[in-house]
Image (cartoon, rainbow, N blue to C red):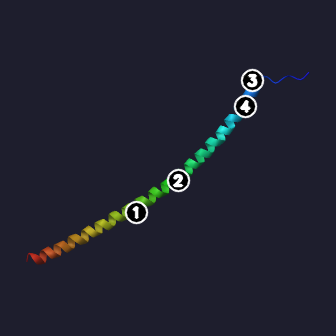
Amino acid sequence: MPKKKSATSLVQQSVGIRLSSHEKLCAERMKNLLSSIERLEKKVESLSESVNRGKGAVAVLVFIGSAIAAVIGFFTYK
C-alpha cells in the first residue's frame, strides 16, 4: 500500500515554490537597481566634467576681465 503524502510535505513544497519565485523577483529587482546605478554614475561623471569645464571658463573670463580693467585703469589714471 503506497504511503499518503503528509500535509507537512505539501506545505514545505509550497513554501519552496514561494521562496524560489521570491528569489527570482529579487534577482530581477537587483538587476534593475544595478543598471540604474550604472546610468546614474555615467550621468554624474558627465555632469562633473561639465562643471569642471565651466569653472575653467569662469577662471579665464575673470583673468581677461582683470587684464582689461588693469589696462583701462592704467590709461585712465595716467
Q: Is residue 17 left or right of residue 42?
A: right
Task: Give the distance between the C-alpha atoms of the residues marked 3 and 2, in whole angstroms.
Answer: 44 Å
Q: Is residue 69 above or below residue 11?
A: below
Residue 11: % across, % down:
73, 27
Q: Is residue 63 left or right of residue 76?
A: right
Q: Residue at x 67, y 35 (%)?
A: 19
Residue on which the image places disc 1? 50
Q: Secondary structure at mark 2?
A: helix
Quadrant housing residue 16? top right
Q: Which mark is residue 8?
A: 3
Tag 3: amino acid: Thr
Q: Secondary structure at mark 1?
A: helix
Tag 2: amino acid: Glu
Q: Earlier in the sequence, mark 3 or mark 1?
A: 3
Task: Give the distance between the C-alpha atoms of the residues marked 2 and 4, in whole angstroms.
Answer: 36 Å
Q: Which mark is residue 38?
A: 2
Residue 57: % across, % down:
32, 67
Looking at the image, which is closer to me, 65 or 13? Answer: 13
Q: Is residue 58 above or below residue 40?
A: below
Quadrant housing residue 60? bottom left
Residue on which the image places disc 4? 14
Task: Give the distance between the C-alpha atoms of the residues marked 3 and 1, in whole angstroms.
Answer: 62 Å
Q: Nearer the viewer, mark 3 or mark 1?
A: 3
Task: Give the distance between the C-alpha atoms of the residues marked 4 and 1, in whole angstroms.
Answer: 54 Å
Q: Earlier in the sequence, mark 3 or mark 2?
A: 3
Question: Label 3: how many residues lie within 10 Å, few (<14), some (14-19) or many (20+)?
Answer: few
Residue 6: % across, % down:
79, 22
